[in-house]
Amino acid sequence: MFEFLDDQPSDRVVAAVYFAARLIVHRHDMGDFRKALPIQGVDTEPTNQEAELGLQIIEEIVTREKTQDIDGLSAEKASHYVSRLVRLAEDRLLKDLGTTKPGRSREILERWRRDGARPAVQG
């Protein structure tokens, strides 16, 4: 499941997963999730590419669950998919940021800085 994410950079996958998880968590408040596109320029919003990947994630879940939209997911199913997505993102980051690719974490941080990303926690 979600194999289309395999060839994407880790930072894009994490942002797409976060966006998809937000859509799932707030599924009852949104109406048509296909119209819940991000507002560009807001720090917590994904780029267009990340949003498209997030929407692909949602489409795959909806297709798999045979519902019309994510609003049709039960609380149990929603929780299952959010947990699965979090594990996917964690596994991807551990793989890419671990010792198998020295310097990869620095590359991602540098790209985030160039793109104007700000850390969630200042310390």
Image (tube, helix red, strand yellow):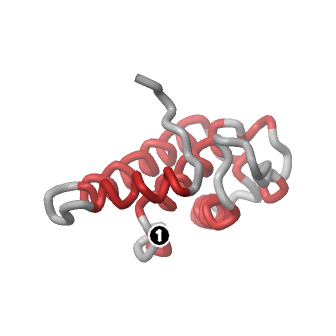
How packed is label 1: few (under 14 Cα within 10 Å), some, or many (20 or more)?
many
- Front-most of 93 and 118? 118
Residue at 76% in and 59% down: 68
Report the quarter where the C terminus lies: top left
- Front-most of 91 and 74? 91
Residue 118, percent from left and from top: 54, 39
- Front-most of 60 and 115? 115
Q: Is residue 73 above or below residue 98?
A: above
Looking at the picture, which amino acid does disc 1 mark?
Answer: Leu
Residue 85 shown left or right of residue 68 in the figure: left
**Looking at the image, how many numbered discs can be counted on the residues?**
1
Residue at 57% in and 42% down: 78
Residue 62, percent from left and from top: 65, 60
Residue at 30% in and 55% down: 105
Residue 116 shown left or right of residue 41 in the figure: left
Q: Is residue 60 above or below residue 17?
A: below
- Front-most of 6 and 38? 38
